[in-house]
Image: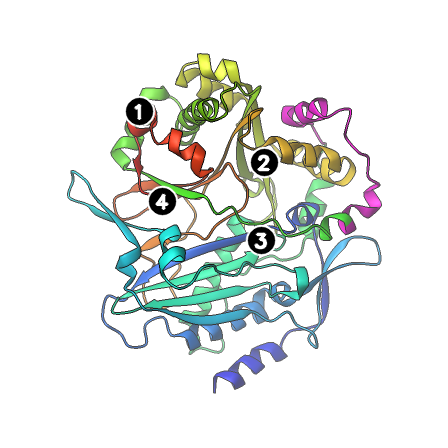
Protein backbone atom coordinates (compact mmCIF):
# COMPACT_ATOMS: atom_id res chain seq x y z
CA UNK A 1 0.00 0.00 0.00
CA UNK A 2 2.76 2.50 0.95
CA UNK A 3 4.79 1.67 -2.18
CA UNK A 4 1.76 2.32 -4.37
CA UNK A 5 1.15 5.69 -2.70
CA UNK A 6 4.79 6.71 -3.11
CA UNK A 7 4.76 5.73 -6.78
CA UNK A 8 1.65 7.83 -7.26
CA UNK A 9 3.46 10.84 -5.79
CA UNK A 10 6.57 10.26 -7.91
CA UNK A 11 4.58 9.88 -11.11
CA UNK A 12 3.40 13.48 -10.82
CA UNK A 13 6.94 14.94 -10.91
CA UNK A 14 7.67 16.64 -14.23
CA UNK A 15 11.03 17.04 -15.98
CA UNK A 16 12.40 20.53 -15.35
CA UNK A 17 15.59 22.54 -14.93
CA UNK A 18 15.48 24.94 -11.97
CA UNK A 19 18.08 27.70 -12.32
CA UNK A 20 19.81 28.44 -9.04
CA UNK A 21 20.38 31.94 -7.74
CA UNK A 22 23.79 33.36 -6.95
CA UNK A 23 23.24 33.08 -3.21
CA UNK A 24 22.07 29.49 -3.67
CA UNK A 25 25.31 28.37 -5.31
CA UNK A 26 27.41 30.34 -2.80
CA UNK A 27 26.20 27.90 -0.11
CA UNK A 28 27.03 24.74 -2.06
CA UNK A 29 28.71 22.10 0.12
CA UNK A 30 26.91 23.22 3.29
CA UNK A 31 23.76 21.69 4.72
CA UNK A 32 20.93 22.73 7.01
CA UNK A 33 19.72 20.29 9.65
CA UNK A 34 17.72 19.88 12.78
CA UNK A 35 16.85 17.41 15.53
CA UNK A 36 13.23 17.78 16.56
CA UNK A 37 12.22 15.84 19.66
CA UNK A 38 8.63 14.73 20.16
CA UNK A 39 6.97 13.15 23.19
CA UNK A 40 4.23 10.52 23.00
CA UNK A 41 1.86 11.93 25.60
CA UNK A 42 -0.92 9.35 25.11
CA UNK A 43 0.93 6.06 24.62
CA UNK A 44 -0.23 5.92 20.99
CA UNK A 45 1.26 2.76 19.38
CA UNK A 46 1.31 4.56 16.00
CA UNK A 47 3.03 7.68 17.34
CA UNK A 48 5.15 9.35 14.62
CA UNK A 49 4.45 6.47 12.22
CA UNK A 50 7.35 6.07 9.80
CA UNK A 51 4.92 5.24 6.98
CA UNK A 52 3.01 8.48 7.52
CA UNK A 53 6.24 10.47 7.75
CA UNK A 54 7.52 8.99 4.47
CA UNK A 55 4.18 9.37 2.70
CA UNK A 56 3.92 13.02 3.73
CA UNK A 57 7.52 13.70 2.66
CA UNK A 58 7.01 12.26 -0.82
CA UNK A 59 3.76 14.18 -1.21
CA UNK A 60 5.18 17.56 -0.23
CA UNK A 61 8.24 17.05 -2.47
CA UNK A 62 6.22 15.86 -5.47
CA UNK A 63 3.53 18.54 -5.17
CA UNK A 64 5.59 21.52 -4.03
CA UNK A 65 9.36 20.90 -3.84
CA UNK A 66 10.50 18.73 -6.80
CA UNK A 67 13.87 20.50 -6.55
CA UNK A 68 14.66 18.23 -3.57
CA UNK A 69 14.77 15.23 -5.93
CA UNK A 70 16.87 17.00 -8.57
CA UNK A 71 20.62 16.95 -9.20
CA UNK A 72 22.99 19.91 -9.59
CA UNK A 73 24.47 20.68 -12.98
CA UNK A 74 25.67 23.54 -15.19
CA UNK A 75 23.14 24.83 -17.70
CA UNK A 76 23.84 25.82 -21.28
CA UNK A 77 24.23 29.46 -20.21
CA UNK A 78 26.88 28.54 -17.63
CA UNK A 79 24.49 29.03 -14.71
CA UNK A 80 23.99 26.53 -11.92
CA UNK A 81 20.81 24.49 -12.22
CA UNK A 82 19.03 21.65 -10.46
CA UNK A 83 17.95 19.10 -13.05
CA UNK A 84 14.78 17.23 -12.12
CA UNK A 85 14.65 14.08 -14.27
CA UNK A 86 11.75 11.72 -13.47
CA UNK A 87 13.87 8.82 -14.75
CA UNK A 88 16.85 9.71 -12.54
CA UNK A 89 15.48 11.22 -9.33
CA UNK A 90 17.72 11.88 -6.34
CA UNK A 91 15.69 9.82 -3.88
CA UNK A 92 15.44 10.67 -0.17
CA UNK A 93 17.44 8.56 2.28
CA UNK A 94 15.02 7.59 5.06
CA UNK A 95 15.53 5.14 7.92
CA UNK A 96 14.13 4.29 11.33
CA UNK A 97 16.72 3.67 14.04
CA UNK A 98 16.44 2.08 17.49
CA UNK A 99 18.57 2.90 20.53
CA UNK A 100 18.80 0.38 23.37
CA UNK A 101 18.72 3.10 25.99
CA UNK A 102 15.94 5.46 27.06
CA UNK A 103 16.05 8.96 25.59
CA UNK A 104 16.23 10.30 29.14
CA UNK A 105 19.76 8.85 29.36
CA UNK A 106 20.86 11.59 26.94
CA UNK A 107 19.02 14.43 28.65
CA UNK A 108 20.63 17.04 30.84
CA UNK A 109 18.19 18.62 33.28
CA UNK A 110 18.24 21.87 35.23
CA UNK A 111 15.90 22.97 37.99
CA UNK A 112 15.23 26.70 38.16
CA UNK A 113 13.88 28.84 40.97
CA UNK A 114 10.45 29.18 39.40
CA UNK A 115 10.01 25.41 39.57
CA UNK A 116 10.74 24.65 35.93
CA UNK A 117 12.68 21.44 35.28
CA UNK A 118 14.13 21.98 31.85
CA UNK A 119 15.44 19.16 29.66
CA UNK A 120 18.22 19.43 27.07
CA UNK A 121 19.39 16.82 24.58
CA UNK A 122 23.14 16.17 24.87
CA UNK A 123 24.18 15.44 21.29
CA UNK A 124 27.78 14.61 22.16
CA UNK A 125 26.70 12.08 24.77
CA UNK A 126 24.24 10.62 22.26
CA UNK A 127 26.98 9.98 19.71
CA UNK A 128 29.29 8.54 22.39
CA UNK A 129 26.86 6.14 24.03
CA UNK A 130 23.86 5.41 21.79
CA UNK A 131 25.58 3.08 19.34
CA UNK A 132 25.01 5.72 16.64
CA UNK A 133 28.36 7.44 16.25
CA UNK A 134 27.24 9.84 13.53
CA UNK A 135 24.29 10.81 11.37
CA UNK A 136 24.61 11.34 7.62
CA UNK A 137 24.57 14.85 6.20
CA UNK A 138 22.78 15.87 3.03
CA UNK A 139 25.14 16.44 0.13
CA UNK A 140 25.05 16.34 -3.63
CA UNK A 141 28.64 15.13 -3.80
CA UNK A 142 29.18 11.49 -4.72
CA UNK A 143 25.50 11.24 -5.72
CA UNK A 144 24.23 11.21 -2.14
CA UNK A 145 20.61 11.96 -1.31
CA UNK A 146 19.54 15.58 -1.04
CA UNK A 147 17.07 14.75 1.74
CA UNK A 148 18.13 12.64 4.71
CA UNK A 149 15.62 11.66 7.38
CA UNK A 150 16.19 9.54 10.49
CA UNK A 151 13.41 8.66 12.91
CA UNK A 152 15.10 7.58 16.16
CA UNK A 153 13.23 5.61 18.82
CA UNK A 154 14.46 4.74 22.30
CA UNK A 155 13.95 1.82 24.64
CA UNK A 156 11.17 2.29 27.20
CA UNK A 157 10.83 5.98 26.41
CA UNK A 158 8.01 8.18 25.08
CA UNK A 159 10.46 10.38 23.16
CA UNK A 160 11.15 10.18 19.42
CA UNK A 161 13.81 12.19 17.58
CA UNK A 162 13.24 13.34 14.02
CA UNK A 163 16.57 14.19 12.36
CA UNK A 164 16.45 16.01 9.02
CA UNK A 165 19.34 17.17 6.83
CA UNK A 166 18.97 19.06 3.55
CA UNK A 167 21.48 20.88 1.31
CA UNK A 168 21.82 24.62 1.91
CA UNK A 169 21.94 25.25 -1.84
CA UNK A 170 18.17 24.56 -1.90
CA UNK A 171 17.01 26.21 1.34
CA UNK A 172 18.03 28.90 3.79
CA UNK A 173 16.85 28.88 7.41
CA UNK A 174 13.51 30.55 6.71
CA UNK A 175 12.83 28.24 3.77
CA UNK A 176 13.65 25.02 5.64
CA UNK A 177 11.36 26.03 8.52
CA UNK A 178 8.59 26.51 5.95
CA UNK A 179 9.45 23.19 4.29
CA UNK A 180 9.24 21.31 7.60
CA UNK A 181 5.90 22.91 8.46
CA UNK A 182 4.54 22.21 4.96
CA UNK A 183 5.71 18.59 5.19
CA UNK A 184 3.94 18.26 8.54
CA UNK A 185 0.81 19.90 7.13
CA UNK A 186 0.71 17.50 4.18
CA UNK A 187 1.20 14.56 6.56
CA UNK A 188 -1.70 15.68 8.75
CA UNK A 189 -3.94 15.77 5.68
CA UNK A 190 -2.97 12.53 3.95
CA UNK A 191 -6.55 11.30 4.18
CA UNK A 192 -7.67 14.16 1.94
CA UNK A 193 -6.13 13.62 -1.52
CA UNK A 194 -7.49 16.98 -2.70
CA UNK A 195 -5.83 18.95 0.11
CA UNK A 196 -3.70 21.93 -0.93
CA UNK A 197 -1.32 23.99 1.17
CA UNK A 198 -2.77 27.32 2.24
CA UNK A 199 0.57 29.08 1.59
CA UNK A 200 2.43 27.10 -1.09
CA UNK A 201 6.12 27.88 -1.63
CA UNK A 202 7.43 30.09 -4.42
CA UNK A 203 10.26 28.09 -6.00
CA UNK A 204 11.05 30.18 -9.09
CA UNK A 205 14.39 31.95 -8.55
CA UNK A 206 13.34 34.44 -11.23
CA UNK A 207 11.42 36.46 -8.63
CA UNK A 208 14.73 37.25 -6.93
CA UNK A 209 16.55 38.08 -10.17
CA UNK A 210 13.71 40.33 -11.31
CA UNK A 211 13.64 42.19 -8.01
CA UNK A 212 17.39 42.80 -7.80
CA UNK A 213 17.45 44.02 -11.42
CA UNK A 214 15.66 47.10 -10.05
CA UNK A 215 18.13 47.68 -7.21
CA UNK A 216 21.32 49.76 -7.27
CA UNK A 217 24.17 48.11 -5.38
CA UNK A 218 25.83 49.83 -2.42
CA UNK A 219 28.96 48.15 -1.11
CA UNK A 220 28.71 47.36 2.63
CA UNK A 221 31.66 48.40 4.83
CA UNK A 222 32.67 44.82 5.66
CA UNK A 223 33.21 44.03 1.97
CA UNK A 224 35.64 46.94 1.74
CA UNK A 225 37.35 45.64 4.89
CA UNK A 226 37.96 42.16 3.48
CA UNK A 227 39.11 43.62 0.16
CA UNK A 228 41.71 45.73 1.92
CA UNK A 229 42.73 42.86 4.17
CA UNK A 230 43.61 40.55 1.29
CA UNK A 231 44.25 43.08 -1.47
CA UNK A 232 47.55 41.51 -2.51
CA UNK A 233 46.29 37.94 -2.65
CA UNK A 234 42.78 38.31 -4.10
CA UNK A 235 42.51 36.25 -7.26
CA UNK A 236 40.28 37.36 -10.11
CA UNK A 237 38.01 34.63 -11.47
CA UNK A 238 35.97 35.09 -14.66
CA UNK A 239 32.29 35.44 -13.78
CA UNK A 240 31.44 32.89 -16.48
CA UNK A 241 33.00 30.06 -14.45
CA UNK A 242 31.79 31.05 -10.95
CA UNK A 243 28.86 28.60 -10.95
CA UNK A 244 31.06 25.72 -12.11
CA UNK A 245 33.71 26.63 -9.52
CA UNK A 246 31.27 26.76 -6.61
CA UNK A 247 29.34 23.64 -7.62
CA UNK A 248 32.65 21.75 -7.69
CA UNK A 249 33.48 22.78 -4.14
CA UNK A 250 33.93 19.94 -1.64
CA UNK A 251 31.47 19.41 1.18
CA UNK A 252 32.06 21.57 4.22
CA UNK A 253 32.56 19.20 7.16
CA UNK A 254 30.47 19.65 10.28
CA UNK A 255 32.25 20.97 13.36
CA UNK A 256 31.95 18.42 16.15
CA UNK A 257 33.11 20.42 19.18
CA UNK A 258 29.64 21.65 20.04
CA UNK A 259 28.60 23.18 23.38
CA UNK A 260 25.30 24.38 24.80
CA UNK A 261 24.48 27.31 27.06
CA UNK A 262 21.02 28.12 28.42
CA UNK A 263 19.73 31.56 29.36
CA UNK A 264 16.50 31.74 31.33
CA UNK A 265 14.11 34.51 30.34
CA UNK A 266 14.93 36.35 33.57
CA UNK A 267 18.69 36.15 33.06
CA UNK A 268 18.34 37.17 29.43
CA UNK A 269 16.44 40.30 30.42
CA UNK A 270 19.01 41.00 33.17
CA UNK A 271 21.74 40.78 30.52
CA UNK A 272 19.94 43.30 28.31
CA UNK A 273 19.40 45.68 31.21
CA UNK A 274 23.05 45.41 32.27
CA UNK A 275 24.40 45.97 28.76
CA UNK A 276 22.01 48.63 27.44
CA UNK A 277 18.26 48.48 27.92
CA UNK A 278 17.84 50.53 24.75
CA UNK A 279 19.31 47.70 22.64
CA UNK A 280 17.72 44.46 21.47
CA UNK A 281 18.40 41.27 23.39
CA UNK A 282 20.26 39.90 20.38
CA UNK A 283 22.69 42.84 20.30
CA UNK A 284 23.21 42.74 24.05
CA UNK A 285 23.97 39.00 23.92
CA UNK A 286 26.33 39.53 20.98
CA UNK A 287 28.23 42.17 22.95
CA UNK A 288 28.75 39.85 25.93
CA UNK A 289 29.80 36.95 23.70
CA UNK A 290 32.16 39.12 21.65
CA UNK A 291 34.09 40.29 24.67
CA UNK A 292 34.13 37.05 26.65
CA UNK A 293 35.18 34.96 23.63
CA UNK A 294 37.94 37.48 22.87
CA UNK A 295 39.14 37.19 26.48
CA UNK A 296 39.16 33.39 26.24
CA UNK A 297 40.95 33.63 22.91
CA UNK A 298 43.71 35.76 24.43
CA UNK A 299 44.15 33.28 27.27
CA UNK A 300 44.27 30.30 24.93
CA UNK A 301 46.70 31.71 22.36
CA UNK A 302 48.57 34.03 24.75
CA UNK A 303 48.33 36.84 22.20
CA UNK A 304 46.00 39.67 21.20
CA UNK A 305 44.08 39.09 17.94
CA UNK A 306 44.05 42.06 15.62
CA UNK A 307 40.37 41.77 14.75
CA UNK A 308 37.21 40.65 16.51
CA UNK A 309 34.47 39.78 14.02
CA UNK A 310 30.75 39.57 14.69
CA UNK A 311 28.47 38.16 11.99
CA UNK A 312 24.67 38.27 11.81
CA UNK A 313 22.75 36.70 8.93
CA UNK A 314 19.66 38.63 7.92
CA UNK A 315 16.65 37.55 5.90
CA UNK A 316 16.20 39.84 2.90
CA UNK A 317 12.57 38.76 2.46
CA UNK A 318 11.78 41.41 5.07
CA UNK A 319 13.57 44.10 3.04
CA UNK A 320 12.41 43.32 -0.49
CA UNK A 321 9.28 42.65 -2.50
CA UNK A 322 10.19 38.96 -2.78
CA UNK A 323 7.37 36.84 -1.28
CA UNK A 324 7.88 35.57 2.27
CA UNK A 325 7.06 32.09 0.90
CA UNK A 326 10.10 32.15 -1.43
CA UNK A 327 11.80 28.78 -0.95
CA UNK A 328 15.40 29.50 -1.97
CA UNK A 329 18.28 31.33 -0.33
CA UNK A 330 17.64 34.98 0.43
CA UNK A 331 19.71 35.36 3.60
CA UNK A 332 22.80 37.57 3.62
CA UNK A 333 25.51 38.27 6.17
CA UNK A 334 26.31 41.52 7.94
CA UNK A 335 29.76 41.55 9.55
CA UNK A 336 31.19 43.92 12.15
CA UNK A 337 35.00 44.07 11.96
CA UNK A 338 36.04 45.46 15.35
CA UNK A 339 39.57 46.16 16.54
CA UNK A 340 40.22 43.70 19.34
CA UNK A 341 41.88 46.24 21.61
CA UNK A 342 38.79 48.43 21.33
CA UNK A 343 36.59 45.47 22.29
CA UNK A 344 38.80 44.60 25.23
CA UNK A 345 38.83 48.17 26.54
CA UNK A 346 35.21 49.00 25.78
CA UNK A 347 32.09 48.56 27.88
CA UNK A 348 29.40 46.13 26.80
CA UNK A 349 27.23 49.13 25.90
CA UNK A 350 29.95 50.50 23.62
CA UNK A 351 30.51 47.09 22.01
CA UNK A 352 26.77 46.65 21.38
CA UNK A 353 26.63 50.08 19.77
CA UNK A 354 29.63 49.31 17.56
CA UNK A 355 28.05 46.03 16.42
CA UNK A 356 24.78 47.83 15.73
CA UNK A 357 26.49 50.44 13.57
CA UNK A 358 27.84 47.71 11.31
CA UNK A 359 25.13 45.06 11.39
CA UNK A 360 21.84 46.93 11.59
CA UNK A 361 22.34 48.96 8.41
CA UNK A 362 21.24 46.13 6.17
CA UNK A 363 19.35 46.77 2.95
CA UNK A 364 18.56 45.31 -0.44
CA UNK A 365 21.23 47.63 -1.85
CA UNK A 366 23.85 45.93 0.34
CA UNK A 367 22.43 42.53 -0.65
CA UNK A 368 22.73 43.42 -4.35
CA UNK A 369 26.38 44.32 -3.75
CA UNK A 370 27.02 40.97 -2.07
CA UNK A 371 25.51 39.18 -5.07
CA UNK A 372 27.87 41.19 -7.31
CA UNK A 373 30.80 40.22 -5.08
CA UNK A 374 30.06 36.50 -5.43
CA UNK A 375 29.67 36.81 -9.19
CA UNK A 376 32.67 39.06 -9.87
CA UNK A 377 35.02 39.12 -6.85
CA UNK A 378 34.87 35.62 -5.42
CA UNK A 379 38.27 36.14 -3.79
CA UNK A 380 36.64 38.48 -1.27
CA UNK A 381 34.35 35.63 -0.21
CA UNK A 382 37.33 33.34 0.34
CA UNK A 383 39.16 36.06 2.29
CA UNK A 384 36.16 36.43 4.59
CA UNK A 385 36.01 32.65 4.99
CA UNK A 386 39.58 32.39 6.27
CA UNK A 387 39.18 35.44 8.54
CA UNK A 388 35.98 34.45 10.33
CA UNK A 389 37.36 32.05 12.94
CA UNK A 390 39.01 31.97 16.35
CA UNK A 391 42.77 32.02 15.94
CA UNK A 392 45.81 33.93 17.24
CA UNK A 393 44.93 36.66 14.71
CA UNK A 394 41.13 36.80 14.90
CA UNK A 395 38.25 36.34 17.31
CA UNK A 396 34.84 35.43 15.93
CA UNK A 397 31.17 35.25 16.88
CA UNK A 398 28.76 34.17 14.12
CA UNK A 399 25.30 34.46 15.65
CA UNK A 400 22.30 32.93 13.86
CA UNK A 401 19.04 33.78 15.61
CA UNK A 402 16.44 31.02 15.11
CA UNK A 403 14.47 32.14 18.14
CA UNK A 404 11.45 33.31 16.18
CA UNK A 405 11.38 30.57 13.56
CA UNK A 406 8.10 28.57 13.57
CA UNK A 407 9.76 25.36 14.74
CA UNK A 408 7.47 24.40 17.61
CA UNK A 409 4.57 24.35 15.15
CA UNK A 410 5.98 21.38 13.17
CA UNK A 411 3.13 18.99 13.94
CA UNK A 412 2.78 15.75 11.94
CA UNK A 413 -0.56 15.04 13.57
CA UNK A 414 0.79 13.99 16.97
CA UNK A 415 1.41 17.40 18.53
CA UNK A 416 4.32 19.79 18.27
CA UNK A 417 7.87 19.10 19.48
CA UNK A 418 8.93 19.19 23.13
CA UNK A 419 12.63 19.97 22.59
CA UNK A 420 14.60 21.56 19.76
CA UNK A 421 18.17 20.57 19.04
CA UNK A 422 20.40 20.13 16.00
CA UNK A 423 23.10 17.92 14.60
CA UNK A 424 26.64 19.13 14.25
CA UNK A 425 26.71 22.18 11.98
CA UNK A 426 29.46 23.83 9.96
CA UNK A 427 32.25 26.22 10.85
CA UNK A 428 34.05 26.94 14.06
CA UNK A 429 32.79 30.13 15.70
CA UNK A 430 29.20 29.75 14.47
CA UNK A 431 26.45 29.83 17.07
CA UNK A 432 22.69 29.19 16.90
CA UNK A 433 19.99 30.58 19.15
CA UNK A 434 16.82 28.52 19.68
CA UNK A 435 13.83 29.39 21.82
CA UNK A 436 13.13 26.99 24.67
CA UNK A 437 9.40 26.62 25.26
CA UNK A 438 9.91 24.76 28.53
CA UNK A 439 10.82 27.92 30.44
CA UNK A 440 10.69 30.71 27.85
CA UNK A 441 14.46 31.14 27.75
CA UNK A 442 16.92 30.49 24.93
CA UNK A 443 19.42 27.76 24.10
CA UNK A 444 22.73 28.83 22.56
CA UNK A 445 24.51 26.11 20.59
CA UNK A 446 28.16 27.09 20.21
CA UNK A 447 30.77 25.82 17.78
CA UNK A 448 33.96 26.54 19.71
CA UNK A 449 36.98 24.35 20.22
CA UNK A 450 36.97 22.37 23.45
CA UNK A 451 40.24 24.01 24.52
CA UNK A 452 38.77 27.46 24.03
CA UNK A 453 35.58 26.49 25.85
CA UNK A 454 37.64 25.50 28.90
CA UNK A 455 38.61 29.16 29.25
CA UNK A 456 35.16 30.45 28.31
CA UNK A 457 33.36 28.44 30.98
CA UNK A 458 35.51 30.12 33.64
CA UNK A 459 34.24 33.56 32.63
CA UNK A 460 32.38 35.07 35.57
CA UNK A 461 30.92 37.70 33.23
CA UNK A 462 29.29 35.04 31.03
CA UNK A 463 28.25 32.77 33.92
CA UNK A 464 26.37 35.66 35.50
CA UNK A 465 23.75 35.09 32.80
CA UNK A 466 24.25 31.62 31.32
CA UNK A 467 24.12 28.03 32.56
CA UNK A 468 26.56 25.60 30.96
CA UNK A 469 24.66 22.50 29.84
CA UNK A 470 27.50 20.67 28.06
Along the polypeptide, which appears first: circle 3 or circle 4? 3
Q: Quadrant of residue 453?
A: top left
Q: Which residue is mark 1?
A: 460
Q: Nearer the viewer, residue 222 or 139?
A: 139
Along the polypeptide, which appears first: circle 1 or circle 3? 3
Task: List x then y, in percent, for residue 247.
Answer: 72, 52
Task: List x then y, in percent, for residue 33.
Answer: 49, 54
Question: Residue 94, relative to residue 340: is it above or below?
Answer: below
Q: Which residue is mark 4?
A: 435
Residue 443 visible in the snapshot: yes
Question: Residue 212, relative to residue 166: is it above or below?
Answer: above
Q: Residue at x 78, y 45 (%)?
A: 242
Quadrant position of the C terminus in the picture: top left
Q: Distance between the Cα atoms at labels 2 and 4? A: 21 Å
Task: List x then y, in percent, for residue 59.
Answer: 53, 72
Along the polypeptide, which appears first: circle 4 or circle 1? 4
Assess disc 2: are there few (<14), some (14-19) or many (≥20) residues with their C-alpha within 10 Å of its C-alpha: some
Along the polypeptide, which appears first: circle 2 or circle 1? 2
Q: Residue at x 41, y 70 (%)?
A: 97
Q: Which residue is mark 2?
A: 333
The nearer-to-camera label among 4 and 1 is: 1
Q: Which residues are magenta?
A: 217-244
Q: Distance between the Cα atoms at labels 2 and 1? A: 30 Å
Residue 361 visible in the snapshot: no
Assess disc 4: are there few (<14), some (14-19) or many (≥20) residues with their C-alpha within 10 Å of its C-alpha: many
Q: Which residue is mark 3?
A: 171
Q: Distance between the Cα atoms at labels 4 and 1? A: 24 Å
Amino acid sequence: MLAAMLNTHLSSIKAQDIELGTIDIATFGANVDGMIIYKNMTGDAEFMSINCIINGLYKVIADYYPIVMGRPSIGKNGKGVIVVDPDNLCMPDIAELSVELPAEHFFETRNYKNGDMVKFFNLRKFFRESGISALPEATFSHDHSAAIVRLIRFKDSPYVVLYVSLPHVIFDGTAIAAFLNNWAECTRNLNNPEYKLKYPPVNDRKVVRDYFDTVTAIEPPHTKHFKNLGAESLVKVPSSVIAALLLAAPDIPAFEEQHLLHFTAEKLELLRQDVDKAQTTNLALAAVLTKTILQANIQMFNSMPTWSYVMFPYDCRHRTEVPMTYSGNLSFSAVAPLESQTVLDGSYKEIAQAIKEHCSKVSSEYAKSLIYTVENEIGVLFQAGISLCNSPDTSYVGLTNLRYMPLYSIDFGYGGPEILSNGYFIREGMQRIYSNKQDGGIDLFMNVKDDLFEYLKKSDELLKYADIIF
